[in-house]
Every structure is written in structure tokens, then in C-alpha cells.
Amino acid sequence: NNHKSDSRGALIVLEGLDRSGKTSQSSRLLSYLEGLSHSVESWRFPDRNTGVGQMISSYLANESQLDDHTIHLLFSANRWEKRSLMESKLRSGTTLIVDRYSFSGVAFSSAKGLDIEWCKAPEIGLLAPDLVLYLDIPPEKAAERGGYGGERYEQLEFQRKVAHSYQILRDASWKTVDAGLPLDDVEKQLREMVLDCVTTCQKGKVLSKLWS
Ligand code: FDM
């Protein structure tokens, strides 16, 4: 028996405020796992390359206006359109490092005042991450990093509300890292958590669905 080809990849999600360092850390984790000869890909949501993704992208750039419920459902649809590919990658042994997922969907929309249970509903049945890594940074500190690119949600006042929503969503299974530390220190902590998760999935941890 070739156990390696039977083992599945891990679904690892990075969450956090804008400028918390998710994107840098995803690419570092990708290189790290590649270096260990793991099959791994880095993904992000929104995936702006699909038709739905282009609608989202133009909304974020303030080039189009959409009702809060409508854009929420588009973000969710953007995950649904990638669901089967996601599952086949994982089942064939590829680990996915995903920059934002359903938790961003709920945190950002509920920060606008939408009911949290309503926000979670369209996510039911998507694949549940094996690990959620929360890059924790105070909104003020994230704002100081500059480089808010001027997209729709990149404002301190709104990011404070998003931080609050993340606090409500977060459960005991999430792993939180202090994202105010130097990048190398953050990476070191993440590496250990990620490797541990990849190993658990290889050993046969069951792939489950949201919300569980
Ligand atoms: N965002 C992202 C949402 O509002 N809902 C979602 O479901 C997702 C995945 O889109 F401000 C927000 C979060 C962020 C913006 O994300 C674009 P990136 O990471 O800057 O591309």
C-alpha cells in the first residue's frame, strides 16, 4: 500500500484584518512546505479571476454599488464556485493555504450590521478548514503600517468593527498569533502550527463541512 497517495492535504485558512500580514505569511508558508516536498498551493478569496470575482473586485474598488446582502452572497458564491476543485485538490493530497475564507465573509458583512446568523447561512456545506490561523493585530497598528490601498473596507473605523466581529466568530479551535511581532517570528510560530496540521490530515483526519 502506498499510504502517501492515500493521504489528503490540509485546508489551512489565514484570517485577520487588512494589513495583518496574511498575504506575506501565505507566501512564506507556501515556500516552507514546498521546501519540505509537500504538494501545496496558495489560494485566496475573493478569487478575482472568475466572473463573480470580477463583480466583487469592481465593488471593492468602488466602481460599482451593491446592496450589502447582495455583495455578501457574491462573496459566498465565489467560494461555492471553487468548492469542488478545492475538495478534489485536498483529496488528491494537495494542501491549500487560503488567504481569507468564510470567516472574512461573516466578519466583514456583520460589521456592516447584517445579522450574523444570516451571514453564516450561505456558508453551510462549504469545506471546513482543518486549521484557522488568526493574525491578531490592533486596528490602529494595522493602519499605521500604511498601504491601505483605498479599497472600500480599508478604513480604521470599519476595521475596528471587523475586529469586533472576528472576536465573536473566533472559537477555541482557532490559533492566534501576535501579528505585531517581526515577520520572521510570526512565520516561525505559523510553521509549527501548519506542519502539525498537515501531519494530522495525512494520518486520516476527516474532512468536514461548515459550520462544525
Ligand atoms: N472580504 C473578503 C469580504 O468582505 N467578504 C469575504 O467573503 C471575503 C473573502 O474583501 F477587505 C473583504 C475583505 C477585504 C476585501 O480582500 C478584499 P483582500 O484580501 O484585500 O483581497
Image (cartoon, rainbow, N blue to C red):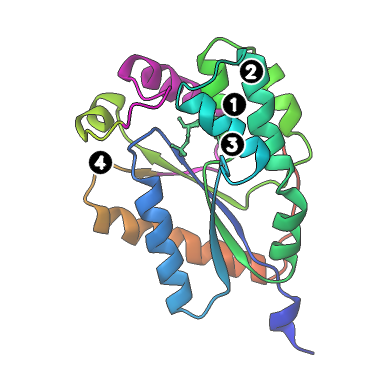
Q: Which of the 4 quarters of the picture holds residue 75?
A: top right
Rendered image: mark on residue 24: none
Q: Which residue is mark 3?
A: 54
Q: Cβ of disc 1 within 8 Å of ligand 1?
A: yes
> Is 171 inside the magenta-drawn segment?
yes
Question: Please, what secondary structure does the residue beneath circle 3 have?
Answer: helix
Res. 209 image quadrant: top right
* x 35%, y 53%: residue: 24
- Which contiguous range is marked in magenta? 149-176
Q: Which is more foreground, mark 1 or mark 3?
A: 3
Q: Which residue is mark 1?
A: 106
Mark 3 and mark 4: Cα distance apart in space: 32 Å
Image check: 38 left or right of 3? Answer: left
Q: Which mark is residue 116?
A: 2
Identify residue type, mark 4.
Gly
Location of residue 130 in the rendering, given as x and y in whole percent from the top left corner: 62, 53
User: Alpha carbon of mark 1 to alpha carbon of mark 4: how far?
Assistant: 24 Å
| Above or below: residue 188 compared with residue 5 | above
- Indicate which disc, 3 or 4, sits on the residue closer to the N terminus: 3
Q: CA distance from mark 2 to mark 4?
A: 28 Å
| C-alpha separation, residue under disc 1 versus residue under disc 2 | 7 Å
* Image location (x, y in percent) of residue 61: 45, 27
Residue at 65% x, 66% y: name it: 9
Q: Regarding mark 4 in the picture, which secondary structure is present there?
A: loop
Would you say the residues marked 1 and 2 are in contact, meaning their CB atoms lie under 8 Å apart?
yes
Under circle 2, the secondary element is helix
